[in-house]
Image (cartoon, helix red, strand yellow):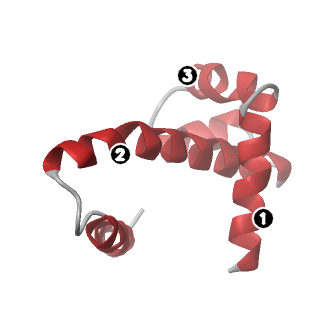
Amino acid sequence: MSEDRQARIRGALHGVLQELSAESTSLDLVEDIPILEAFVNDYADARIADARACGASWSDIARRLGVSRQAVHKRFAAKRTGRRDGAIIELRFARDKS
């Protein structure tokens, strides 16, 4: 990923989080951490599912993430069932509307 793309993503996220936290205390912001972690995990699950649906192999995905194929498969292959499925669909629809 290019440094420009990284900077744009970080800047956009920082702006949104700064706006959302404008009237919160430091302790209130601590409560946001599990929400943000769950969102990032759901986002990752959705992006991996999209990549797999478009024909990307576990090896392709692993190279992009800088980890082993086994690590990617272990983390994401099991997410096809259970609670995460609803989140994946929700994130796909949210992205498609943009």
Q: Secondary structure at mark 3?
A: helix
Q: Position of residue 75 (x, y in %)?
A: 60, 24
Estimate how packed mark 3 is, as few (under 14), some (14 to 19) or many (20 or more) residues with alpha carbons within 10 Å: few
Could you tell me the amino acid type at mark 2?
Asp
Task: Decide: is 8 above or below 77.
Answer: below
Query: Label 2: which residue?
Result: 32
- Quadrant of image for the C terminus: bottom right
Q: Are marks 3 and 1 in contact (CB under 8 Å)?
A: no
Q: Position of residue 11 (x, y in %)?
A: 29, 73
Q: Are marks 1 and 2 in contact (CB under 8 Å)?
A: no
Q: Nearer the viewer, residue 67 or 36?
A: 36
Estimate how packed mark 1 is, as few (under 14), some (14 to 19) or many (20 or more) residues with alpha carbons within 10 Å: few
What numbered label is drawn on residue 93? 1
What is the spatial separation of the Cα atoms under label 3 and label 2, in whole angstroms? 28 Å
* Residue for point 35% across, 75% down: 8
Q: Secondary structure at mark 2?
A: helix
Q: Position of residue 18 (x, y in %)?
A: 26, 68
- Quadrant of image for the N terminus: bottom left
Estimate how packed mark 2 is, as few (under 14), some (14 to 19) or many (20 or more) residues with alpha carbons within 10 Å: few
Q: Position of residue 47 (x, y in %)?
A: 66, 51
* Residue for point 17% across, 53% down: 25
What numbered label is drawn on residue 71? 3
